[in-house]
Image (cartoon, grey):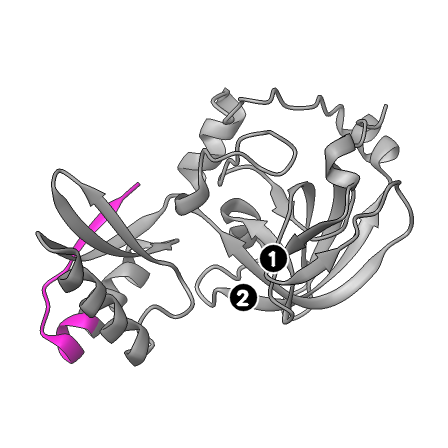
Amino acid sequence: KAEVIHPAATRPYKALGEIYVPMKDYQPFKQAGVASWYGKRFHGRKTANGELYNMYGMTAAHPTLPLPSYVKVTNPSNGRTVIVRVNDRGPFKHSRIIDLSYAAAHKLRILDRGSAHVEIEAVNAASYAAQNKIAPPAPDALGSNASNNSLQNAVQAFFVQVGAFKFESNASSLKQKIQNLGIANGNDIQHVYNSQLHRLKLGPYTSRSKASQIAADIKQRLNINSIIHTQ
């Protein structure tokens, strides 16, 4: 049977100065607009309905659809279609209608661009769950089972580390330069602090060759030697 709508997720809420009124039940829904995606920065963090975000799962965030619910997402530029489970809120930019997981964006071939025009349509939750024998995930599950491990291996992530600094100001300065040059191509520029260093990374990218292109571009335009690694 269909999953129960999360009660707290039906309450009106405010984000970035805007009031959003979530749907209280499942109903026909279609929308067209720009999709973006979110990845490692949010991996393992709680979603709006209390689950943990798994970048390798087929999930999405939407401002007003019931949580959880299912939508079909189509990339009209290549005809690719995926079914995702909506379990989070966002995006909160007027130009975007849905945030996809890393895996969903990979299957739609929109990772490298960062965003793309898509069409979304609500899927009958009961029918979809019955056909696919879906069980609701545990609140703290991060998809450590064999099938999700296979997906993680299939969707390997490559990152380009462009610097590691003692002082945060140096990392912030380089981040601004990269943003101004548009090198990141819509992907996250991640500022990570560990081992007493401020590390700046670009990605994730779906292939080593793409990461190598970015590294070469950085070398040519900023004369910086980068390190490519997987996550």
Indicate the position of residue 16 as horizontal and vertical percent values.
59, 61
Residue situated in front as seen by the camera: 115 or 212: 115
Q: In the rendered image of this protein, does residue 28 appear above or below residue 42?
A: below
Residue type, numbered disc 1: Pro
Q: Residues within 10 Å of mark 1 (few under 14, many from 20)?
A: many
Q: Quadrant of the C terminus?
A: top left
Label 2 and label 1: CA atoms lie apart by 12 Å
**Label 2: which residue?**
115
Looking at the image, is mark 2 or mark 1 nearer the viewer? 1
Residue 171, quarter of picture: bottom left
**Label 1: which residue?**
91
Indicate the position of residue 108 as horizontal and vertical percent values.
58, 57
Identify the magenta region: 218-231
Query: Is 125 displayed left or right of 62 in the figure?
Result: right
Mark before the other along the chain sequence, 2 or 1: 1
Q: Can residue 67 be seen?
A: no
Q: Residues within 10 Å of mark 2 (few under 14, many from 20)?
A: many
Q: Residue at x 9, y 74 (%)?
A: 223
Q: Can residue 2 be seen?
A: yes
Is there CB contact under 8 Å for labels 2 and 1?
A: no
Q: Is residue 94 magenta?
A: no
Q: In the rendered image of this protein, does residue 142 appear above or below residue 207?
A: above
Indicate the position of residue 216 as horizontal and vertical percent values.
19, 70
Indicate the position of residue 87 as horizontal and vertical percent values.
66, 39
Q: Residue at x 40, y 62 (%)?
A: 187
Secondary structure at numbered mark 2: strand
Secondary structure at numbered mark 1: loop
Q: In the rendered image of this protein, does residue 118 appear above or below residue 222?
A: above
Residue type, numbered disc 2: Ser
Residue 125, quarter of picture: top right
Query: Is 103 displayed left or right of 128 in the figure?
Result: left
